[in-house]
Amino acid sequence: MKKLLTLLFAVALTVSLSSVTFAQDAGTADKKEDKKEMKADKAKAKDTKAAKKAHAKKKTEEKKDEMKPEAK
């Protein structure tokens, strides 16, 4: 009986450890793809932010030009 219980415990331990190993292996591929997507999103956000900043600067310059008195 003691040998059977030991064998059962050994099998349960082996299965639980192998499932953790496979779970880690599958997760690494997803992380690489997620990192690529995050980099693309950051680049897009950076471009959008730069475009908004340029647009705001242009509007500010236009307002300054409108406020300047015209020389006659």
Image: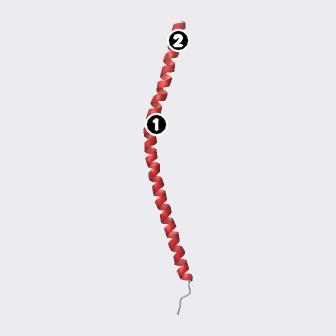
Question: Whole-percent x and y of residue 30?
Answer: 44, 40
Q: Residues within 10 Å of mark 2 (few under 14, many from 20)?
A: few
Question: Whole-percent x and y of residue 6?
Answer: 53, 12
The residue located at (44%, 48%) in the rendering is 37
* Distance between the alpha carbons at the discs numbered 2 and 1: 32 Å
Q: What colouring method underlies this structural image?
A: secondary structure
* Amino acid on which the number 2 mark rests in the picture: Thr
Above or below, comparing residue 60 to residue 71 in the picture: above
Residue underneath mark 1: 27
Above or below, comparing residue 18 to residue 29 in the picture: above
Residue underneath mark 2: 6
As drawn, which residue projects farthest toward the bottom? 72
- Tell me the tag on residue 42: none
* Amino acid on which the number 1 mark rests in the picture: Gly
- In the rendered structure, are the residues bearing label 2 and label 1 in contact, judged by CB atoms less than 8 Å apart? no
Question: Whole-percent x and y of residue 53?
Answer: 51, 66
As drawn, which residue projects farthest toward the front? 71
If the image is split into quadrants, where does the N terminus sit?
top right
**Which quarter of the picture shows residue 69?**
bottom right
Question: Whole-percent x and y of residue 67?
Answer: 57, 82
SS at mark 2 in the image: helix
The residue located at (53%, 81%) in the rendering is 65
Q: How many marks?
A: 2
SS at mark 1 in the image: helix
**Which quarter of the picture shows residue 60?**
bottom right
The residue located at (46%, 53%) in the rendering is 41
Mark closer to the chain start, 2 or 1: 2
Above or below, comparing residue 2 to residue 12 in the picture: above
Q: Residues within 10 Å of mark 1 (few under 14, many from 20)?
A: few
